Image (cartoon, helix red, strand yellow):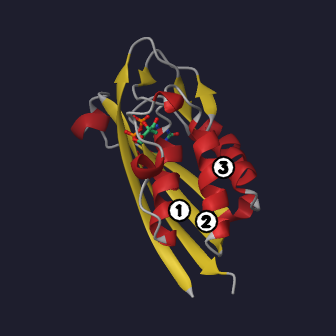
Amino acid sequence: MMRIGIGYDAHRLVEGRSLVLGGINIPFDLGLLGHSDADVLTHAVCDALLGAAGLGDLGKHFPDSDERYRNIRSLFLLEQIGEMVRKAGYAVVNIDAVIVAQRPRLAPFVGRMVANLAEVLEIDPVRVNVKATTTEGMGFEGRGEGMSAYAVVLLKNLE
Ligand SMILES: Nc1ccn([C@@H]2O[C@H](COP(=O)(O)O)[C@@H](O)[C@H]2O)c(=O)n1
Ligand SMILES: C[C@@]1(CO)OP(=O)(O)OP(=O)(O)OC[C@H]1O
């Protein structure tokens, strides 16, 4: 059986925080605000995986009321979700994701984001695709108030 999942997340851009996307520290004058490192791309992938496996969402497993997760590296959460998905009997067919950000230019970093996501999920990087888009200045991402990310995941049942 194949199962599809969708993930969406958004975080506010603020001063005094690092910008982390797909586990990569990206040089920028602003960073994303969150309880964790606020890696919006990784959060969208986490939620898509959990959704496809029927395992709820990121906040259910790693609540932002829990101090253990303050400033946690989201790639570490993704690694644990990868284990949950495997234990539930599924393997990743492919992941596709898009980061919505007006600035900075993210294309030069996308290859390293893919490598990080694939590594922690223990899958071939050809199964992972990451894209970036602006909104041509429209909406909260376009005004530079925040960033969002969408991801879809296809899982296959190992039985
Ligand atoms: N933050 C971003 C946004 C986009 N890109 C790259 O630019 C291309 C064109 O963007 P559009 O918003 O016009 O779709 C897009 O395909 C991305 O490769 C980027 O690097 N960083
Ligand atoms: C990752 C967690 C936990 O640290 O916190 P945030 O970084 O605030 O991220 P969000 O996507 O709002 O919710 C999931 C969380 O519970």
Closer to us: 22 or 64: 64
Are the two marked residues, 1 and 2, in contact with CB atoms closer than 8 angstroms? Answer: yes
Tell me which label, 1 or 3, sits earlier in the chain: 1
Under mark 1, the amino acid is Leu
x then y, percent, for residue 116: 70, 44
Q: In the drawing, what numbered circle is on residue 120?
A: none
Tell me the quarter of the picture where residue 13 sits: top left
Whether residue 22 is visible to the viewer of this picture, yes or no, is no
Identify the secondary structure beneath mark 1. Answer: helix
Task: Residue at the far top: name it.
Answer: 16
- x and y, in percent, of residue 59 in the image: 40, 47
- Disc 3 target residue: 79
Q: Amino acid at mark 3?
A: Glu
In the picture of the structure, the residue carrying the numbered disc 2 is 85
Between 46 and 61, which is closer to the camera in this rendering?
61
- Element type at mark 2: helix
**Residue 48: percent from left, percent from top:** 47, 61
86 to the left or right of 9: right
Residue nearer the viewer, 2 or 99? 2
Q: Which residue is mark 1?
A: 49
| Mark closest to the chain's N terminus, 1 or 2 | 1
Q: Quadrant of the C terminus?
A: bottom right
Q: Is residue 65 left or right of residue 109?
A: left
Image spot of residue 112 (x, y percent): 70, 41
**Residue type, mark 2 in image:** Val
Which residue is found at the position 32% from the left and 43% from the top? Answer: 135
Residue visible at 40% across and 35% down in the picture: 64
Q: CA distance from mark 1 to mark 3?
A: 11 Å
